[in-house]
Image (cartoon, helix red, strand yellow):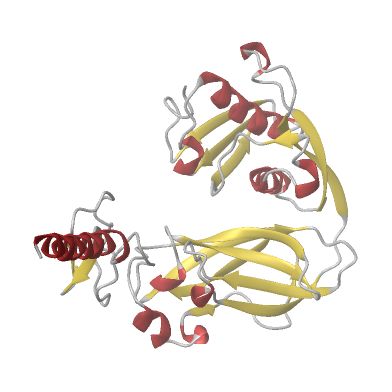
Amino acid sequence: MQKKYFIITGVVILIIVAAAVGARFFSGENAWVCEDGKWLKHGNPTAPMPDGGCEGISGDPVGMKPHYSSDIQQKYATEEKIKVISLKSGDAIESPVEIEGEARGIWYFEGSFPIIIEDEKGNLLGQGNAYAQGEWMTEDFVPFRGVATYNLGDNEKGFVVLRKNNPSDLEEYDESIKIPVAFRAQEQIAIKIFFGKHGADSSMAQCEKVYPVERKILKTPAIGRAALEYLLQGPAENEKKEFFTSINPGVKVNSLEIEDGIAKVDFSKEIEEDAGGSCRVLSIRAQITETLKQFPTVKNVVISVDGRVDDALQP
């Protein structure tokens, strides 16, 4: 009888432990939860409190799900979440194409979302990013601006696709709008962008060694800016076995000015993230510098990050 009692007691304890473990790992207990418009700790989250307010968000643990609950995601039809002002169906465009409009905060993540240029069959021609022009942690509309570059090839028509930024990769949160466009015929020119090469000498003396890769792009007065945009896209899939980039994804060009032989280029803060180490910093600088110095109007390059020059991109 006593043995039976111990067995029953052991089973009960195991059930209690299993329930506790399940609550710990599967209920989103350790997360930030929005209650009455304020972020509250749920358990002991390891992530810092999200930036901005959370008005209109109800109960989604941040870090486990998107910032916005499924109720808010479904509250608006896609056409009620994003409006494009600078482009309408059937417009003729050329590269680089600038897009302006406004989108609700749920369309952004970290203040941006991707712009994709496709041909009529859905093949990728080019891409870029749109960036919020104000606080994006809101349910309201927030203005955006973006630039995308593309290779025309033999295509006459295609689509500009504005895709909701979906860091969760959950299909239920995928959304986009496709705007049919015509591609203006443009003269193409060849430019070079510079990458590191796998298998090359990895000594410190070779950190600044970068190698040219050719791109055929549409002729544009802003050729320096276009070259940088292609550089930031990194090697094409068929080039990745041979070349690599030291520049982080998600970097944007804030501004580029060329005057008296000096190119002053300002990048967003992402270019410095996890860029520690002298060799990588030298490689990043070399990729940018060589890409710009291919143009005869550029003799020297000054790189800044969000306006900072002296301490920008330092080891």
Viewer-side residue, 274 vs 191? 274
Residue drawn at (74%, 69%), measured in percent from left and top? 118
Q: Position of residue 310 (x, y in %)?
A: 43, 25
Vertically, is 156 above or below 186? Answer: below
From the viewer's perspective, is 181 left or right of 146?
right
Residue drawn at (41%, 80%), measured in percent from left and top? 73
Q: Position of residue 110 (x, y in %)?
A: 42, 57
Quarter of the picture containing the N terminus is: bottom left
Q: Is residue 261 visible?
A: no
From the viewer's perspective, is 134 left or right of 222?
left
Vertically, is 170 above or below 46? Answer: below
Residue drawn at (68%, 83%), measured in percent from left and top? 89
Seen from this angle, which residue lies furthest front?
1
Q: Quadrant of residue 294?
A: top right
Q: Is residue 65 visible?
A: yes
Q: How many marks?
A: 0
Q: Position of residue 233 (x, y in %)?
A: 66, 48
Residue drawn at (57%, 62%), measured in percent from left and top? 146
Seen from this angle, which residue lies furthest right?
154
